[in-house]
Amino acid sequence: MKNSLKAILLLLSSLFAAVLPAAEPTTILLWSNGAPGSEGRTAPEKVEPPKRGQEYIKVSSIHNPSITAYLPTKDKATGAAVIICPGGGHSFLAMDIEGDNVGKWLSEHGIAGFALKYRLAREANSTYKVEVHALQDTQRAIRLVRSRAPEWGLSPNHIGVMGFSAGGQLAALAAARYDAGLTNAADAIDAVSSKPDFQALLYPAIPRDLVFTKEATPPAFLVCGFNDRQNISEGLPNLYLQLKKANVQTELHVYSDTGHGFGFRPASQAPVAGWPARFAEWLDHSGFLKN
């Protein structure tokens, strides 16, 4: 009788675990004691909800950069993770369609998503710089996620970066300017490698003077729209050719009848709405979804 009861309890426990929802998203400051270069900045974040002519959430006034963690359930987890850099011209962040929506989708498909709020260099009266503070935030996010890989069930060599528009610029810079960990780091997180294992660039602002090599450049997944601005709709295929010439494994998608800023809108029926599935397929084919 006791054995039968035990078996029933174990069965109920397993059934309950199978229907558990993904963990609630958690926001984590990149620096618990304040970001270097933001000393004395106490203005709160500004959140502007969607409205006519602006179909996304705008976040600005970021002085305490953070990541919001979207972790998959253990039964779905693949061990892969993506730091997501929203765009907004470095004056705001399109936080839902280029951040949180993406993190949610990834977590539902077994990939940990971390939506990044980074400091804005082109916001009115900002003293921040793209290649100093915003890039530092991106690098710190990679270090932080890798430092907590055991806690979150992640593979430390399956951690990549994704960016949209201005966030794509940061992702590309992070994939080119990384280190194995800062020497003599006072902070243990800074002693962790900032190298992304892969990069996903969606209609990015393409940095100049990037150098690519098969040995040093992370594999890339590139997406843009045919109707985007010329520097992107032609610039991204040109970037693909540069990566191919360097023998860096790269996949390129150009969606017809599509412009800039499509992000990820779960209700969209447009063909471009399928890009996250193509990204997951690419990760799987590239070996990043295998623990």
Image (spheres, rainbow, N blue to C red):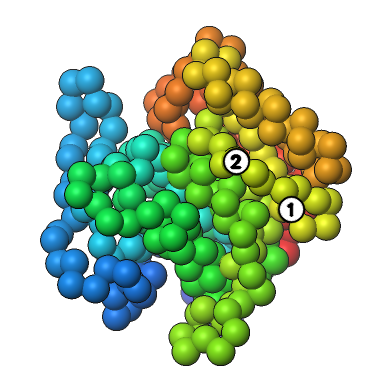
Q: Amino acid at mark 1?
A: Thr
Task: Look at the picture and state if 275 lies above or below 132.
Answer: above
Q: Which residue is mark 1?
A: 217
Residue at the spot 28% in from the left edge and 33% down from the top edge:
56
Q: Position of residue 170 (x, y in %)?
A: 50, 49
Left or right: 200 in relation to 96: right
Compute the Cα span from label 1 to label 2. 15 Å
Residue at the spot 72% in from the left edge and 53% down from the top edge:
218
- Between 276 and 33, the one nearer to me in the picture: 33
Quarter holding the N terminus is bottom right
Quarter holding the C terminus is bottom right
Residue at the spot 66% in from the left edge and 46% down from the top edge:
210
Left or right: 5 in relation to 100: right
Locate residue 250: give its quadrant.
Answer: top right
Mark closest to the chain's N terminus, 1 or 2: 2
Instruction: Say which of marks 1 and 2 sits in front.
Output: 2
- Between 90 and 17, the one nearer to me in the picture: 90
Q: Position of residue 115 (x, y in %)?
A: 42, 53
Q: Position of residue 223 (x, y in %)?
A: 60, 30
Residue at the spot 57% in from the left edge and 51% down from the top edge:
173
